[in-house]
Image (spheres, rainbow, N blue to C red):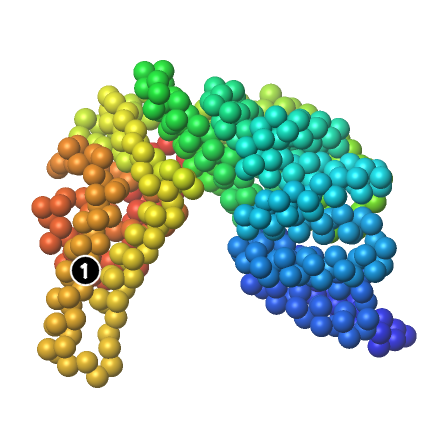
Amino acid sequence: MLSRAQNCFGEAQTLHQMGDLAASIGDSEVSLLHYRQALRIRRAIGDRGGQAATLGRMADMFAVRGQHAKALQQYTQALSLLRSLEDRRGEAWILSGLGTAYWQSGKLSEALDRLESTLPIFRSLGDRAGEAVALRRLASVHTDLTSPLRAMTLLRESHQLSEQLGDPDGQAESLYQMARVHAQSGDLRRACEVAEAAVLLTERQRSRVGSASKRVLYLAAVRNYYDLLIDLLMQRHRTAPSEGHGTAAFLVSERARARSLLETLTESGHEIRRGVDPALLERRQSLQKRLEAQTEFLLLGNAYSLTPQEAQAAGRELQRLTTEFERVEAAIRTSNAAYAALTQPPAPDLAAIQREILDENSLLLEYALGAERSYLWALTRSSLASFELPGRSEIESRVRQFYSLLAAANASRKGEAETQRAARLKSAKRQIRESAGALGRVLLGPVAGQLGGGRLLIVAEGGLQYLPFAALAEPRELEKATARTFGAASGAASRNRELALGFVPNGVAS
């Protein structure tokens, strides 16, 4: 029979694992709730190693939420515990997290100090996985310090280690950071090539994740790779508008959006599997599940709990499973041309989109929101124009303001007299008109001359999916559009998604 202490230890471990699970699906609030419960128990039973592990994961979650002061506090507590236990591997991982938190909060000298101190520890332990992560994090600091040569040296070393370990996600992150360094040095051509290689690696990995919901989470984690490639191509377009970089950026945006329908077809389209050997399909499904489990083990587990030998063995197993999965996929494609066409279609083609989706009276507007700059493409049957817009935070702030004004105008107020309501709505209409005008100038101003009586198709993303574009389209109709918009906010996202159907030959843009 288990003792009370053993029961408490097991309960704390379960709560910690539940926190890890919530973290893996992006729910930082629930994960922190479980971690706090685990931490209370671990403190009560004096489990210092367990406390350090939970504090480290709590710090990770605070860092994800942008709460850097809290992250630094938790990392520091964990570091003190690990040093008292003389746990060198744990100390190195926490120092790595601490350095990253300093970097994220803009304290570059402190970040450099912590991250540089992790490398000799990982190397002395033979922990090549930890060393690869530390090298990438250290490179990020040197990039921000405008030390491109040092950053590139670190990234090449990290990429080589990740390749040896069979860690494609580590390779992709190294390539992504290399692209940033090339861009910082002014070599946009090379930056685009390397960013494209990072995107291809992530697309290859994403196809091996078992469920659609987890693929969505994976894409969210690597969406910045697409955003960087789009931004780099558009920077090249600015200096050489006749070389097709604007078109290439539009097609990268389409690639990112097209994934959802392809995955739905793969999961639910049983017809495309007709004629394929059932044993091959069963083998593919089994390998996909094992790949997913192995990837999660490497990415979501407490890295400092693995010995170097365990980490290397896990990397080799991931590489072996990947090779076998590719062999089975190739066999399925060979036996079924329809399966190959739908699950691995050719890249989006501009002429095909124009020919198959648009008529002479259609205008397609596609938005891509980026951290520093956003972009708008205006596509007709015979032309494609691109425009630079403000960054995501500015645009989504304006959208939230507009949405809030609509919601406030629709809200009923208890005890409000009719005259008071009329006065409030009059004021609300004025504010909505002003907000809509400002937002319309940002989102539609660049194409104002093309807006007319034809069919307007909107491909939105992020906060723009909740925006009723009908209120912005025609400045001269703004008064009437604003009146029609009362009560429309709740349905805006679904209507915008309906508008977006069919924009991509092989996908649903949403």
- Quadrant for the N terminus in the image: bottom right
Does the rendering let one see residue 310?
Answer: no
* Image quarter of residue 460: top left
Residue placed at 85% from the left, 41% from the top?
125
Give 105 or 273, whichever is nearer the viewer: 105
310, above or below 194, in the image: below
The residue drawn where x is 81% and y is 57% is 83
Identify residue type, mark 1. Gln
In the depicted structure, whether residue 61 falls above or below residue 151: below
- Tell me residue 273's x, y (percent): 56, 32
Q: Residues within 10 Å of mark 1 (few under 14, many from 20)?
A: some
Q: Which percent across, then down, holds residue 161?
A: 73, 30
Quarter-of-image position of residue 55: bottom right
Q: Where does label 1 land, which residue?
A: 431
Residue drawn 54% across and 48% down? Answer: 106
Query: Which one is nearer the viewer's eye here, 171 or 266?
Result: 171
Q: Residue furthest right?
A: 1
Residue 181: percent from left, percent from top: 55, 29
Residue at far front of view = 109
Q: Residue at x 24, y 27 (%)?
A: 380
